[in-house]
Image (cartoon, rainbow, N blue to C red):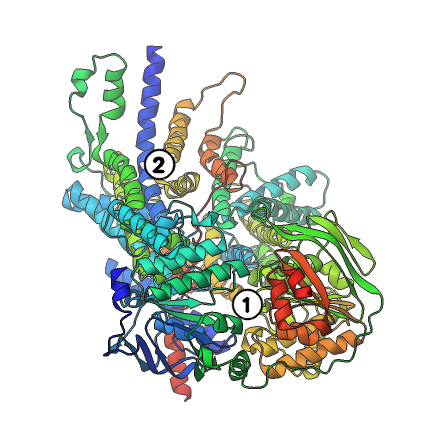
Amino acid sequence: MIDFFYQALWTLDATLRVATPLILCAMAGIFSERSGIVDISLEGKLLSGAFVAAAVTALTGSAWVGLFAAMGASVAMSLLHGFACITHRGDQVVSGLAINILASGLTVILGIALFKRGGQTPTLAADERFRPIELWLSETLNGIPVIGPIYKELISGHSLLVYVALACVPLAAFILYRTRFGLRLRAVGEVPIAVDSAGVSVAWLRYRALIIGGLFCGIAGAYLSISHGANFVREMSAGKGYIALAAVIFGNWRPWRAFGACLMFGFLDAITSRMQGVDLPLIGEIPGQLMLALPYILTILLLSGFIGRPSPPSAIGQPYRK
Amino acid sequence: MSVVKPLPRWADLIFLPLINLCVAFFICGIVVWMIGENPFTALAVMIKGAFVYPGGLGYTLYYTTNFIFTGLAVATAFHAGLFNIGGEGQAYVGSLGILAASSMFAPFMPALLLVLLCIVGSALLGALWAMIPAYLQAKRGSHIVITTIMFNFLAFSLMGWLLAGPLIQPNQQSPQSSPLPEGAHMPKAQAVLDWFGVGIADSLLNMSFILALVALAVFWVLIWKTRLGFEIRTVGKNQDAALYAGINVSKIIIITMMVSGGFAGLLAVNEVMGAQHRVVLNYTAGYGFTGIAVALMGRNHPVGIFFASLLFGALFQGGTELDFEFTSITRDMVLLIQGMIILFSGALAYMFSPTLSRILSRGGS
Amino acid sequence: MSDMTQKTSGDSAARYVLELQNISKSFGLVQANKDIDLQIKPGTIHGIIGENGAGKSTLMNILYGLHRADTGQMMIDGAETKVKSSADALSLGIGMVHQHFMLIPRFTVLENVMLGSEGGALLNAGRVATAAKLAELGKSFDMEVDPDALVSDLNVGTRQRVEILKALKSGAKILILDEPTGVLTPQEATQLFEILHRLRESGVTILLITHKLEEIMAITDNVSIMRRGEMVGHRKTNETNPQELAELMVGRKVLLNVEKPTAKPTDVALSVRNLGCMSSGGYKILDDLSFDVRAGEILGIAGVSGNGQTPLMEVLAGMRVPDEGSFDILGKTITPKSVITPRHMRENQIGHIPEDRHKHGLVLSLEAYENMVLGFHNSDITGEKRLMDKQHMLDHCAAKMEQYDIRPRNPKLLASNFSGGNQQKIVVAREMHQNPKLLIVGEPTRGVDVGAIEFIHKELIALRDQGCAIILVSVELDEIMGLSDRILVMNKGQEVATIDGAEASAQKLGLMMAGIADEAAA
């Protein structure tokens, strides 16, 4: 029993670690998609964020500088996306794809040019990374049954960026539903001409949405390479941007629901590694590939109306023309 | 609502795409220069690698073959107004058709027929893999861009599992299938030409290249000469008018995507039957995504697709040469070029259109 | 409210609340507005009337900052101003109720009204204030709306009120309404007019853009008439009459009289029985409709647009499956269970000239010769070979262009490069080429120049005299009365009455279109 309790605790703990970049990217996706811009470039922004964070930290020795540089790099990618699909009304999917491929190429090319390690960045020392933080009283409370271990193992002991990711969800919800900017943002993704005719700039609203998305993706990238990991390796994002996009869809473009989807997808990932080689009664061993494909399968089922009905922003994907 | 005259046809079809291409290369050149290498030297190395060195041209055309297939896949869907991002997965799954056909028919089928059956098998599997997202879009309203992306990941998972499990070569550790029977190999270009008395350097170039040229012709006839093609283009340009004209839009979406997936599936012919002679993990290596760049650059026209494929073939082959000649630039450079081309020939395709139009009309008056 | 009432006492410095001088605007080669002068007195309802395409909407978009004029000045309260964006317009007190509402269906009324003037970075404070303002405005003009209702749940009339409230809330003292009654039922239109009167009383100046004479006569104080981008006259409404306005609008004697020999109807070609259709929202859009059309006659279908004409045509053309009832068409019975497509219909010699040629009738980015076979691409006009015969299609197109005088005579030109009239002729030529036995025609002359109108009308009469049964749907009463042998009037998806074409008058049809059959018959 105790053993199972700790197993469950560690799985949930791992869930949180896996879900962190998903949560940040999903919030980024919500902002851009709610403004009417399809964002398959989450993957590319995440990857460039990860590379720049690791590279800059390796060069400067400061994780904070790395983090801000990563945010800057992701925002730059967002601006490129905006330049193509807001200013020049290009196809948003094509632009997003271009950014993803550019990110794949550039991160490796620059990595080799800077560090000559075949695209990897040097391994960072412990004090150069965002390390787990032991929350107040976690050791003291550990003695208390159930609550103590939950507090110590699950709630405490994460990197700062995990807590940032968790804070981003209520923040995103607050911005979207409680602020003037949020109201306009949601409006511009539904009927952009209504926003224009109310005297508000459609382009600037969408640019801001993309910039916010870039900031979130930058943090997510930094988490991958200078917090969870200790260096950058090529294709480090490994499809997480797309899973985050699936979570956005699964969460029906709403922050809290998308957060739930991220946790679910993270949980699937976490138990997959725990169940490797485990024979379940009756079923036998479930292939890891199936578990990892589940987020996509679920999202496809959702999109096809087999489980619920998604309601994407009405104007998504359409360039705005007067 | 600026008053800009539309570009003349030649400028729109040839000049503008060339400008976009040049800008893409120019920016890549700047990146090379920033890294501290000479972009012109790099270009020279790539050109030599792609066309001059023995076997270089053969490899270039071998890659070209891949891109013709995946480029056609994307272009076919484009004509129906659909964006098929799933070429990668469709090509990957296509190899299952080859495995199935070869294991079923190899024992009693003559080589030529077996090759034909394997070709049909690869196209069929690619088509089926594309049919599911097409069906989901046509009948259930899910958007094909998102579903085809997800179907790529599903293909990776499925193939990863198959190659590591049920289909793995017995007594082997690496995730790959058993070798194909000899009869299911695509003849090598070197062997065929040798038979005619022409000697060329050895490369992976095989008869799939001819199949690709045939596919280009089939594509042209299908889109511009057949009634089905007329319906495909009508659906792509105006779905309401298609409905009014009595065209079954759902059916056209499904058929088009199946044709598209079929073209993508043929990639397996070149890779599996022509080059590797077995199915190895991740053999599609991003060729499906490059198909998007090819279709965008080639303006969804067979001639354009051929030249765009040739360009990418040369880039891929020349790119491998970069690995040998330079320490700081590698074939990853090709990814950058590819990204730039998608950006400038796709998302920013008309950025220079107003400027060009102004220059042309000034020159004219 | 206070800032609005102040303006009523016309202060001498500004006799006009709004004045335009020499406004010109062109799009490419098209001159949409030319040297427009306009003077609007404060606290009046000023009508601007003109046919579709006369340049009314362009002018209003210039006023509202959505377009920039090429030349000319604009004065508000006597002071010269420049309106560069809708934000400028709003701050100058110009509000606009667009033809297509600028509302977000998934937002509540309150959120829609707040948008653009939220009153602070956080929504809470503004929410309370806006709700209060909304209640106040609703009370004073008798147009209360539930602020928490989702706009998607509101009917069209209420949505329009929300638009008006939105403009008033942002302090509009000049309110532009662009074709406001196009989507309204007659009752809703009457209610709108009452609201407009109340607004005028409180000092709001109203600009009413319309192409309907009766609205101008019913509600405006002054009227300006536009034709082909120019202002052709200004009148006081009580000093003019519909006849004069109509002549100014079209620049010729109205009521085009087509030479029309008496119809000689023969067998029943189409027999509709108890036809019913539901909208996706579950409303009845066709309700228990029954009628016959005989070969050799034109049945006109009159009605305010949106009263079931569109679904009726779609059902008859095979584009939509009916939910109830049946119809016999050239000897075949179609029921809700029939599998029927427009292709079957065409193969049975049924032609369909759709209401909206850009949406349905043409593929604008295909060439003329390809559009000339659209829908018939499986027939032998694309050649008899397995592949489509391009030369055959080009020849066919060239012949039709000659026959119908379609200019320019270039089969390889993209459909988008033809003028409205010539585009329509392409559709007409295509749908008539197989000498149909039944022709379904929707708004055949919308956005078509005068010459083409006469041409198309003559073709329709000629086709009728060859023994074709024709169903003509049009919101232009002149067209209906000029061409139809019998007229069926629709309201809310139902038949109000069917009368003989010779007995019809605009007044009678008008009453029927409003759903009042008895009075009209009396």
* Quarter of the image where one finds residue A295: top left
Compared to B160, does C198 lie above or below? Answer: below
Q: Residue A300 shows which numbered tag?
A: none
The chain containing the residue under callout 2 comes to A
**How many numbered marks appear?**
2
- Identify the residue at image location x=29%, y=69%: C8
- Which residue is labeled 1 in the image? B303
**In the image, residue B19 lies at what x, y percent?**
39, 71
**In the image, residue C505 lies at what x, y percent?**
65, 73
Nearest to the observer: residue A298 or residue B291: A298
Local packing at callout 1 (Cα closer than 10 Å; few below 14, some 14-19, many 20+) is some
The chain containing the residue under callout 1 comes to B
Quarter of the figure with the C terminus of chain B: bottom left
Report the side of A29 relative to C267 (left or right): left
Say which element carries label 2.
Answer: helix
Q: Seen from this angle, which residue lies furthest top? A: A1
Quarter of the figure with the N terminus of chain B: bottom left
Compared to A286, does C408 lie above or below? Answer: below
- Identified by mark 1, the residue type is Val
Nearest to the observer: residue A114 or residue C386: C386
**In the image, residue A102 lies at what x, y percent?**
35, 54
- Identify the residue at image location x=48%, y=18%: A279
Answer yes or no: is residue A35 visible: no
Q: Residue A256 shows which numbered tag?
A: 2
Q: Seen from this angle, which residue lies furthest bottom? A: B365
Nearest to the observer: residue C508 or residue B101: C508
- Identified by mark 2, the residue type is Trp
Say which element carries label 1.
Answer: helix
* Quarter of the image where one finds residue B232: bottom right
Nearest to the observer: residue C454 or residue C370: C454
Q: Work out whether disc 2 and disc 1 sit on a shared chain.
A: no
